Image (cartoon, helix red, strand yellow):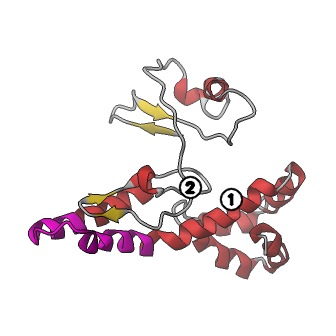
Amino acid sequence: WIIPTNREGTEARIGLCTSTPPPKPIKSYFDMMFTNPLTEPFLKGCTVKGLLGGAIPLGFLDETAMDRVMIVGDAASQVKPLSGGGLYPGLLSSNFCSEVAEEALENNDASKKILKKYHNLWSAALKREIAIGMRIRKRFLQMDDSQVDKYLSYLNDEKILSIISKYGDIDYPSKLAFPLLKNIPILLKFLPEVMHL
């Protein structure tokens, strides 16, 4: 990903995700971003100011609040399993966190009983999407290249691209499933394999 960090567009955070363990050193993938035709135009002439790496937690935590503590973002595993992205889930959850923190301060009560409301709010908003993403990710990682190519070939169709453009949502990819299956019923026969049913 490449995310600008100033209005002028002269600074950005760039990053990538790899499998565990990656087939090559992670730094080699980072270096490839500077020569890849898709990313090179955005990175041409830039200077790397620092490198930072770490694991991205995937899945769903049963608890993200306890006495006097609420965790948000990557620490709370509020990450999209298909992309590893966490801006939207983290920002959405931070709003819930601030609402509950304000309530706790007003009532002078930062007990788990009160702060658990935060966990319930963000879970209601994101848990289903995270669970679906985890199932798709698990199945995708079990596929070989020919299976991946087969499914990607179905996307190379004007009707499908139109549906993706109309209903696709990077933060809620499940919203695309029903319109896609409704308009292209032949995809129903591939659903069990993709969802590993």
Magenta-highlighted residues? 100-124
Residue 180 seen in this snapshot: yes
Relative image position of residue 96 (x, y in whole percent):
30, 66
* Residue type, numbered disc 1: Arg
- Residue beneath the point at 56% across and 50% down: 84
Relative image position of residue 54 (x, y in whole percent):
52, 37
Seen from the viewer's position, the closer of residues 9 and 2 is 2
Location of the N terminus by quadrant is: top right
Left or right side of 90 for 146: right
Q: Which residue is mark 1?
A: 137
Quarter of the image holding residue 197?
Answer: bottom right
Which residue is the extreme one toward the right?
146
- Residue beneath the point at 41% across and 53% down: 73
The rendered magenta stretch, by its main secondary structure, is classed as helix
Q: Which mark is residue 58?
A: 2
Q: How dense is the environment of label 2, judged by Cα within 10 Å: few (below 14), some, or many (20 and up)? A: some
Q: Are marks 1 and 2 in contact (CB under 8 Å)?
A: yes
